[in-house]
Amino acid sequence: MPQLIDHLGAARDIWTRLAEDAPLPGTGSAIVPLDRIEEASATGLELGVHLPNDVEPEAAAPWFERLSLISVDFPSFADGRGFSVGQRLRALGFEGRLRASGPVISDQFDYLLACGFDEVLLPDDVAERQPPEHWTAAPGRITLGYQRGRTGRGSILDARRMPHSG
């Protein structure tokens, strides 16, 4: 069973991700594919949407007020397009939960948080190799990056420009 991780460690997942052709449940929290969002928004479900990492984030923007969660696909830890999708969703104004879904690694957790992600849903094989303790130890290990993060941290360039007191 996939493992949900947030900044506190292992978390309980209340969401059901529906397949393309699965019927909508009557109640609960459901993550639907983008092409089913209009159909699902007419229900009383707590609604989430799953976005492939090659979709334009603007496609979900008209639904932001109705969405509690957006799940972004990370097909591989080496495919960084999901970071950009997450950052763009936040820049467009999405304020709900943002989930990375796929085989990312704990070394990327700080970057996910900096891009606005709240949680990661890991496949079983990654969760077995990297228990929650690896993930909770990750935030803060990397103090500077090349880009300014959502958390307000500066970049390496900002640090170089800081006057040194002597």
Image (tube, grey):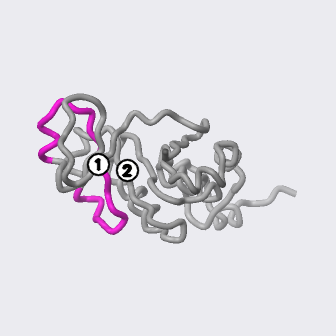
- Give the percent coordinates (x, y) of residue 9: 61, 38
What's the magenta region? 38-59
Depth order, front residue of 161/32: 32
Depth order, front residue of 24/155: 24
Question: Residue sitting at 30 percent across and 34 percent down?
Answer: 29
Where disc 1 sits, the SS reads strand
| Contact between labelled residues 1 and 2, with CB atoms less than 8 Å apart | yes
Sequence-wise, the earlier of marks 2 and 1 is: 1
Question: Residue sitting at 37 percent across and 58 percent down?
Answer: 88
When the figure is inspected, residue 7 is found, relative to residue 53, above or below; the finding is above
* Label 1 sits on residue: 49
Asked if the stretch drawn in magenta spans residue 8, the answer is no
Depth order, front residue of 45/82: 45
Left or right for 21, reference 7: left
- Give the percent coordinates (x, y) of residue 143: 70, 55
* Label 2 sits on residue: 71
Q: Which mark is residue 31?
A: none
When the figure is inspected, residue 163 is found, relative to residue 47, above or below; the finding is below
Left or right for 166, reference 160: right
Asked if the stretch drawn in magenta spans residue 50, the answer is yes
